Amino acid sequence: MSSHAAQSPHLRHQFDDLQQQRTSAALGMWTFLITEVMLFGGVFASYALYRYWYYPEWDLASRQLDLWLGGFNTFVLLTSSLTMAFAVDAAANGNQKALQRNILLTLLLGFVFVGVKVVEYSAKFEHHLVPGQYFEWHGDPVGDMGAFELFFVFYFIMTGIHAFHMLIAFGLLITLYIQARLGKFSAEYYTPVEMIGLYWHLVDIVWVFLFPLLYLIDRN
Amino acid sequence: MAHHSHVKSYLAVYFTLLLLVVATVAVAMIPLGPLAFPIAFGIAVFKTLLIMLIFMHVKDESNLVKIFAFVAFPWLGILFCFMFADYLTRDVSMPIEREQQRAIAIESVMKAREHGHGASDHGASGHGSDSHGSH
């Protein structure tokens, strides 16, 4: 609007004001997150079907996963969501130091998560639990042998897509950190911090469902 | 933009989430039978709501953004409902056993093939009754 005497340098010409600009960004980001929910939703739906078909086999297969590593990773990821929320809060208050510190903490916790995932994956390779030519089932040989392998197909696809999202997020967080160091964000404009925060929280939400579905389906 | 810090509510949400993780693990350890899944699922949904509303600020967004934030879930519901409407009722709608179905399918393919090669009617029906007899 031309009535604005002093326009913010952050305001793109197609928007009326910063508020409208931010809401447009949020709307676009949530639209993208809907597609993410649908992507994971499709995998969850097929998971649900095979879980229903091979109920006892998947109970047994699930026990091969390390509950404590999975639980630790859940804790790490929830903590990283907290530091991400802190980063957005710091940005909104124009606290540059806290913003940079919390971006780094989030990144560090993300590295820990993926590091634990590497440990878990390599244990699966050692125990011949990776689907394919070298898959061997040493557990209780009850039921359909292929169903055990199928569980690990789902384990690797689901945690793999999830971990891939984490790797993308690392790139985003590193970019954010550099931009924050260059002083690109202020209390008036910090939309990128907020939007990447939304992405990070979504990745956390996916894990909230993955952890019980993969690690906790039959532990008693 | 006057912005007051959310640090306290973030911490409250964080500790609630940690408690809920402990609860999920505890629920998995106790034999609850058919209740185990609904309880674990309920906890996951509650955690998701906390993260979305507080960490992702959906609670402070405009109604338009709120709709976009939640609209994926009814769609997922449609996906699950239609898929399970099919698979959970297959036994009801198709009482013939899978082996029988396969035998019938193979038989009809054989018949079609023989017809395609211009075999006589007699030969086709003869083969058909043969495979019937073997069951």
Image (spheres, coloured by chain):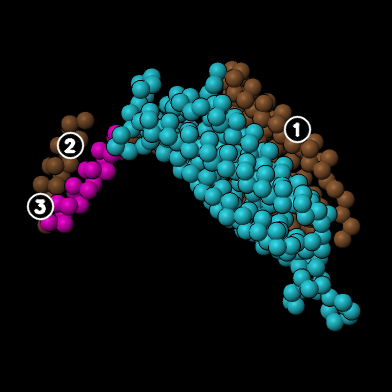
Which residue has dot 2 on it? B131
Which of pointers 1 and 3 indicates the residue nearer the eye? Answer: 1
Question: Disc 2 is attached to a residue of which chain?
Answer: B
Q: Which residue is mark 1?
A: B15
Q: Is residue A166 above or below residue B44?
A: below
Q: Position of residue A120 (x, y in %)?
A: 48, 33
Residue closest to the eye, A118 or A31: A118
B95 is within the stretch colored magenta: no
Q: Does residue B55 show up?
A: yes
Mark 1 vs mark 3: tell me if same chain.
Answer: yes
Give the total of numbered labels: 3
Q: Check the rendered structure and report the hue given to chain A.
A: cyan
Which residue is disc 3 drawn over? B120
Q: Nearer the viewer, residue A105 or B67?
A: A105
Q: Is residue A154 in sight in this rendering? A: no
Instruction: Give the mark toward the camera: 3 or 2.
Output: 2
Amino acid residing under circle 2: Ser
Q: Check residue A155 in the rendering and tell me which mark sits there, or answer none.
A: none
| Parent chain of label 1 | B
Where residue A70 appears, x then y in whole percent? 56, 31
| Residue located at (84% from left, 75% from top) | A7
Which residue range is magenta in the image?
Answer: B99-117
Residue at image x 87%, y 77%? A6
Q: CA distance from mark 1 to mark 3?
A: 78 Å
User: Callout 3, which amino acid?
Assistant: Ser
Q: Are marks 3 and 2 in contact (CB under 8 Å)?
A: no
Percent position (x, y) of residue B77? 60, 45
Tell me, what hue is chain B? brown
Quote the CA–CA distance across marks 3 and 2. Answer: 17 Å
Q: Quadrant of residue B99?
A: top left
